[in-house]
Amino acid sequence: MNRILAISGSLRKGSYNSALLRAAHDLFPERIVLGDIRGIPLYDGDLEEQGVPDAVVRLKAQLADSDGLLLATPEYNNSFPGVLKNALDWLSRPNPEPSGVFRDLPVAVIGASPGGFGTVLAQNAWLPVLRTMGARHFVGGRLMVSAVNRVFNDDLVLADEDVKEKLTRFLEDFLAFAS
């Protein structure tokens, strides 16, 4: 049974993208593992020479134990958030093991936004990054959740049955792609 590491690109406690990944985990608790980018400093080669930060080591270990990666990306100024790109930059570094962690790794990108277009531009912005890293980008469908204030309840639980069904289908297809 394959396992997917799911990482949200938002640090906000009330993040809809983190809520979307919690919903994914609730749908497939044995297969979706939640990662965390909190505590990952900005990439700095001098810092790396002193030793890879613990938060990076933990996330790298989770990724090494996974068969794929699911990113939930917010959209900031028509692109992806710097904190998520920074986390992937750290993960792609050769320390402490050789680089190439993303080579042929199945990766899917989803996102949630209060706006009407979901996260289409952020998802598109990830394509050249994932291609450069050698990942196998999942192109079997897209999931861009818009108008999130009507999709999640006050406790940030996915309450919209249509979106829940779309998320389920997306995850089933990605899990099949990643196996």
Image (tube, helix red, strand yellow):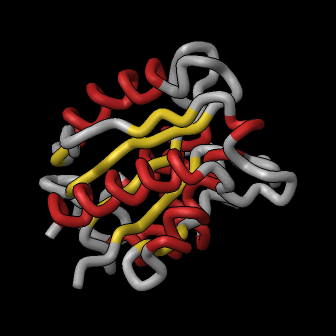
Q: Is residue 51 visible?
A: no
Q: Is residue 35 above or below residue 70?
A: below
Q: Residue furthest front?
A: 161
- Residue 63 against residue 13 in the figure, above or below: below
Does 18 sit left or right of 168 as displayed?
A: right
Tell me what residue is drawn at x 53 percent, y 65 percent: 56
Q: Say which residue appears at 60% left-offset and 68% top-offset.
A: 55
Query: Which sits in the foreground, 119 or 89?
Result: 119
Tell me if residue 65 can be seen: yes
Q: Which percent across, then down, holds residue 168?
A: 40, 59
39 and 23: which one is in front?
Answer: 23
Q: Residue at x 58, y 63 (%)?
A: 23
For the view shown, which residue lies furthest in the top direction?
77
State the image coordinates of residue 61 (x, y, percent, origin top left): 41, 77
Q: How many marks?
A: 0
Q: Is residue 54 left or right of residue 69?
A: right
Where is residue 101? Give x, y as percent: 25, 60
Q: Left or right? Give the position of 153 relative to 90.
A: right
Q: Residue at x 51, y 46 (%)?
A: 162
Q: Quadrant of the N terminus?
A: bottom left
x and y, in percent, of residue 83 in the image: 61, 41
Establish if 79 lies above or below 138: above
- In the picture, which quadrant includes the C terminus? bottom left
Q: Where is 99 relative to 57, above or below?
A: above
